Image (cartoon, rainbow, N blue to C red):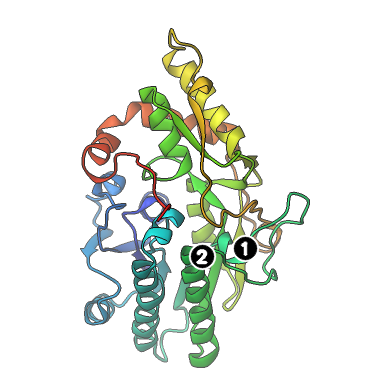
């Protein structure tokens, strides 16, 4: 199968690309605009494969997208390209609407034109987020596929809009679409604007560790390689027209996550003379509209398609910390040029 992966040099997209090239016999066409959060180093291990091709283009460029579909005739699309950081969406929502909504529409149209009578096996998998469902109280049941949408940020609103477009193309044009909504991902190659890589690198450097509000916000954490396997499972085994939620069964408060990072870095690098790294924690003004809790019920995916998370949070976090300690050649150029770790999302 020839699979077109959008955003394949980003965090989750690169995990999908590595999984497809290393663990399957699929061909991969990686379409990525190479924005600030994309790195070629994330796919370096598979870049030499004869089943891999990288095309640098913007999914908002309709003509380029159509040319790629016409030339390469993919058998399936895994759409992961997106602006994804909530704080950046607060500072500049326009780019989120362009990429996440307009870009998705261009892909859907190109995929629609690609389909024909002989394309009965074609699939369009749209990868979305649990943030489209809004916030949960601490004692609420987790999100399911039937949870009503209630996005609370420009980012989640743009992803909800894209979800609705995909369903509309499925209904109106009989396109064979699938949608997944996932919980918070973590793991190697994560751009250091998100909580776990940001705090990890600051802890390694002995810098203050910012936590929004009181740190009581809860997220369900999913190891990125488990997520990649889930997406390939949905693409190849899922029922057209269905939505599947992907979670790691690992709810933690942000404060608990930061405590775990501090302890793991102390274990690997040693406690400094000033004391354990937990002393570096600083509570800072909360993010505007910060959702209290997300939690995923992935039982549909587990029961119908047989996927389950294989990496516990403790195991995955330890592997992640070790990776960042050992791969400063990947993240140091980002700190020196693209993103130095400053606060976003207060405009």
- From this view, report whether residue 115 is shown above or below residue 303: below
- SS at mark 2 in the image: helix
Q: Position of residue 213 (x, y in %)?
A: 57, 42
Could you tell whether 166 is left or right of 201 in the image?
Answer: right
Which residue is located at x 53 percent, y 79 percent?
Answer: 164
Q: Quadrant of residue 151?
A: bottom right
Q: For the point 33% across and 63% down, which residue is it?
A: 27
- Rendering coords of residue 48 (x, y %): 22, 50
Residue named by callout 1: 134
For the N terminus, give its image quadrant: bottom left
Camera-nearest residue between 185 and 160: 160
Q: Secondary structure at mark 1?
A: loop
Q: Residue at x 34, y 39 (%)?
A: 341
CB atoms of marks 1 and 2 within 8 Å: yes
Label 1 vs 2, first from the N-terminus: 1
Residue 232, disc? none
Question: Compared with residue 79, is residue 345 higher up or lower down, i.e. above or below?
Answer: above
The percent coordinates of residue 169 (x first, y second) are: 48, 86
Please tell me which residue lies in front, 289 or 102: 289
Query: At x 46% / y 56%, what residue is drawn?
Result: 86
The location of residue 217, given as percent across then percent down, is 62, 45
Instruction: Give the residue at the far top of this rendering.
Output: 273
> How many residues crowd mark 1 within 10 Å: few (<14), some (14–19), many (20+)?
many
How many marks can you see? Answer: 2
Residue occupied by mark 2: 156
From this viewpoint, is residue 323 visible?
Answer: no
Give the crowd class for mark 2: few <14, some 14-19, many >=20 residues within 10 Å.
Answer: many
Q: Is residue 80 left or right of residue 54?
A: right
Relative placement, left or right, of 108 versus 9 is right
Quarter-of-image position of residue 297 = bottom right
Q: Nearer the viewer, residue 162 or 49?
A: 162
Q: From the image, which quarter does the C terminus lie in? A: bottom left
């Amino acid at each position: 199968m020839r699979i077109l992966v959008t955003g394949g040099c980003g965090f989750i997209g690169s995990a999908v690309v590595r999984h497809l090239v290393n663990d399957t016999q699929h061909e991969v066409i990686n379409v990525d605009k190479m924005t600030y959060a994309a790195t070629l180093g994330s796919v370096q291990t598979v870049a030499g494969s004869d089943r891999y091709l990288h095309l640098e283009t913007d999914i908002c460029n309709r003509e380029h997208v159509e040319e790629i579909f016409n030339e390469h005739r993919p058998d399936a699309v895994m759409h992961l390209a997106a602006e994804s950081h909530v704080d950046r969406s607060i500072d500049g929502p326009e780019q989120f609407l362009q990429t996440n909504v307009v870009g998705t529409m261009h892909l859907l149209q190109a995929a629609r034109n690609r389909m024909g009578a002989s394309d009965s096996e074609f699939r369009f998998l749209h990868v979305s987020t649990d943030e489209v469902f809004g916030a949960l109280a601490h004692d609420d049941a987790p999100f399911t596929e039937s949870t009503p949408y209630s996005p609370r940020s420009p980012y989640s609103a743009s992803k909800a809009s894209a979800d609705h477009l995909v369903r509309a193309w499925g209904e109106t044009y009989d396109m064979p679409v699938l949608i997944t909504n996932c919980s918070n991902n973590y793991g190697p190659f994560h751009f250091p604007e998100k909580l776990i890589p940001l705090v990890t690198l600051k802890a390694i450097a002995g810098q203050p560790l910012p936590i929004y509000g009181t740190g009581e916000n809860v997220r369900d954490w999913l190891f990125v390689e488990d997520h990649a396997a889930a997406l390939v499972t949905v693409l190849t085994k899922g029922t057209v027209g269905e939505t599947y939620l992907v979670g790691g069964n690992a709810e933690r408060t942000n404060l608990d996550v930061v405590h775990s990072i501090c302890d793991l870095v102390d274990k690997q690098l040693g406690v400094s003379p000033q004391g354990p790294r937990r002393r570096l924690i600083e509570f800072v003004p909360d993010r505007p509209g910060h959702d209290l809790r997300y939690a995923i019920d992935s039982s549909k995916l587990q029961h119908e398609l047989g996927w389950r998370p294989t990496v516990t949070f403790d195991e995955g976090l330890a592997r992640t910390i070790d990776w960042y300690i050992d791969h400063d050649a990947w993240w140091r150029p980002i700190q020196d040029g693209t993103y130095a770790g400053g606060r976003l999302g207060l405009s």
